[in-house]
Image (cartoon, coloured by chain):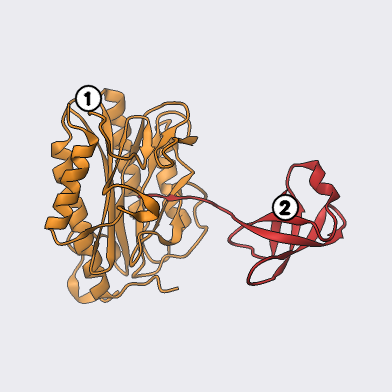
Chain colours: A orange, B red
Amino acid sequence: MSIQKSWSELQTMARACKIVVDTLDLLEAAAQPGVTTKELDTVAREAIVKAGAKPAFLGYRGYPATLCISVNEEIVHGIPGPKKLREGDIVGLDLGCVVDGFYGDAARTVAVGRASAEAERLMKVTREALLAGIDMCRPSKRIGDIGHAVQTHAESFGYSVVRDFVGHGIGTSLHEEPQVPNYGPAGRRERLVPGMCLAIEPMVNVGRPEVEVLADGWTAVTRDGSLSAHFELSVAVTEQGPWILSDPYPYAREAANA
Amino acid sequence: MPEAGRETLEADAIVREALPNALFRVELQGGSRASLLAHVAGDSSLLRLRPGDAVVVEIAPYDAGRGRVVRRR
């Protein structure tokens, strides 16, 4: 299994991830009351093309858009359309792009205008759960340690983590081995090795973890209608610890030969 | 974009032998023709499987030698 990337491959991954995160910054600013989800998709597509990259989701298993946009009780995979954002909505923005054959993938949930205190807390906890998972991306850890860290954090606030969708390895395709669940016991599953790239993406619900997929075949919603948040970053495991690929390499360079 | 998180794979198989304790030896269809030990899931009508019956088995990614018959086909 060629899951370990060379230093130069990681550089390309980092370029792709940076484009995604910069575009998410644009989208976050554009997510205002009255804007349609279709308009945000156009913003995303134009920004990615302008940066010299290619949308990763468009056409992936038949997915019809550049952006996944999931409002309130929608968990992930919401298809952009005529729906207008309203004050107080929370909106999951999930985006990927391809640069020189390598994929970048990231997501965040943002508030339109002012969201309720409950929604703000959900987004904060989900983001923290992602960071707790990322902190496990070190050689000597295992995939199960990531899920365990995410789940423990989210459930300590009374929330639940979605089981039906998982994070994934990422590289020359959008979804590679191994799967990265957001739950489960620590110390299990694949061992982490330097050069491995993982898209870690907790999906956290206020209510129960069960999912329903709508008739469009994509949009996943919480079965109990409760609010859901989703944060994702692509991360490389290095000898020195996790590297969030959309950030500059965070360690001293000479040891960077993972 | 998250991936659909299936913990198990499903595969078509043919029952080759009925063993004690509701265990069956089944042969995978398609490429490998591997044979594996499978127990039956839930439905008691599956207890009456006989050699030659076509079934669907579920296989956990970490143990390819064992499976679980989930339905007839």
- Residue depicted at x 32% and y 72%: A5
Q: How crowded is mark 2: few (under 14 residues within 10 Å), some or many (20 or more)?
A: many
Give how far across and how far down residue A159 sits, in percent.
Answer: 42, 32
Percent across and percent down for residue A214 are: 44, 35
The residue at the point 85 percent across, 53 percent down is B21
Left or right: residue B33 versus residue A222 is: right
**Amino acid type of the residue that numbered disc 1 sits on in the rendered structure:** Arg
Rendered location of residue A148, percent (x, y) = 46, 48
Image-quadrant location for residue A174: bottom left
Q: What element carries label 1?
A: loop
Badge 1 local density, few (<14 within 10 Å), some, or many (20+)? some
Which of A95 and A239 lies nearest the eye of the viewer? A95
Residue A67 lies left or right of residue B44; in this view the side is left
Q: Residue at x 15, y 62 (%)?
A: A52
Query: Circle 2 sits on which residue?
Result: B69
Vertical relation: A109 (above or below) B26: above
Q: In this view, does A197 lie to the left or right of B56?
A: left
Residue at figure coordinates x 30%, y 53% from the top left: A58
Residue A49 seen in this snapshot? yes
Amino acid found under the numbered disc labelled 2? Val
Q: How far apart are marks 2 and 1 (CA)?
A: 48 Å
Task: Confirm whether circles 2 and 1 share one chain.
Answer: no
Which chain is mark 2 on? Answer: B
**Residue A196: image x %, image y %?**
36, 67
Quick one: A160 or A88, which is closer to the camera?
A88
Q: Is residue A142 visible?
A: no
Badge 2 vs badge 1, beta-carbon distance below 8 Å: no
Determine which of the numbered discs, if any, sits on residue A86 in the image.
1
